[in-house]
Amino acid sequence: AQSVAQPEDQVNVAEGNPLTVKCTYSVSGNPYLFWYVQYPNRGLQFLLKYITGDNLVKGSYGFEAEFNKSQTSFHLKKPSALVSDSALYFCAVRDGDSGGYQKVTFGTGTKLQVIP
Amino acid sequence: DSGVTQTPKHLITATGQRVTLRCSPRSGDLSVYWYQQSLDQGLQFLIQYYNGEERAKGNILERFSAQQFPDLHSELNLSSLELGDSALYFCASSVGTVGTYGYTFGSGTRLTVV
């Protein structure tokens, strides 16, 4: 079975400081990894994905994520946080080697609060 | 606008009632996924349809059912509603069967059961 863990319910960071939102995963095959962001009363928006290739993935709004196979992690990062980045962030994973359908599993979400 | 349209945006209904939530996927997407988001259980996968056929089932209650029509829109039917069914219900779509490149989510339907 595949799973994803977001160990922090909430992350607080001052505006202008770097931010990190943590994610670890478990799959039996090669992982396909995703980050989504959800603003209040809105659906989830796709930020970035890792399928294969460079371990550092760049996405929307200046976010990036680093895939670390040995630590089974896919942490979301941004060099300088903006107040407008305050939102709920979801990490997601699916097993890229599974035959047929394998649904995407979402983490429980991490609330990011950027303090002015 | 993500391209995935969900209606209605808000729904308030009484316990025991039945409601239908509607989703139109992004143009060109053949897969539709339904998710339930509640405060205590996070984002739960309910069911997936691909080109009119049920593809996968998640934590969907027997009181809930869904279908995808020939024009690819999908409906999620919730019956014998309970207070605990109050949640945000999201629809997402993808081009293929497995969402390799990610899903596109709609804005959701907020269901309140009173």
Image (tube, grey):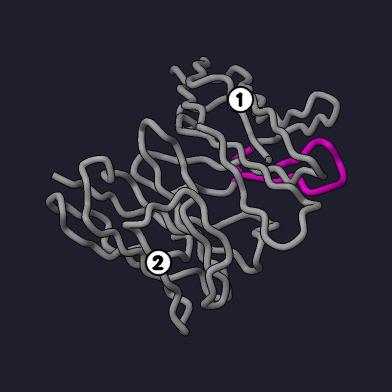
- Residue segment shown in magenta: A47-62
Q: How far across and how far down the image is residue B114, in percent?
A: 13, 44
Q: Is residue A28 above or below residue A109?
A: below
For label 2, the SS is strand
x%, y% of residue A48? 66, 45
Q: Position of residue A56 (x, y in %)?
A: 80, 36
Q: What chain does badge 2 belong to?
A: B
* Left or right, B52 with reference to B12: right
What residue sits 67% from the left and 60% below the top? A101
Horizontal and vertical percent for residue B26? 51, 69
Instruction: Check if residue A55 falls in the magenta segment.
Output: yes
Q: Tell me the tag on residue A56.
A: none
Residue B91 quadrant:
bottom left
Q: Which residue is mark 1?
A: A21
Q: Quadrant of residue B20?
A: bottom left
Mark 1, Cα crowd under 10 Å, few <14 / some 14-19 / many 20+, is: many
Which residue is found at the position 49% from the left and 58% from the top? B47
For label 1, the SS is strand
Q: Which amino acid type is shown beneath numbered disc 2?
A: Ala
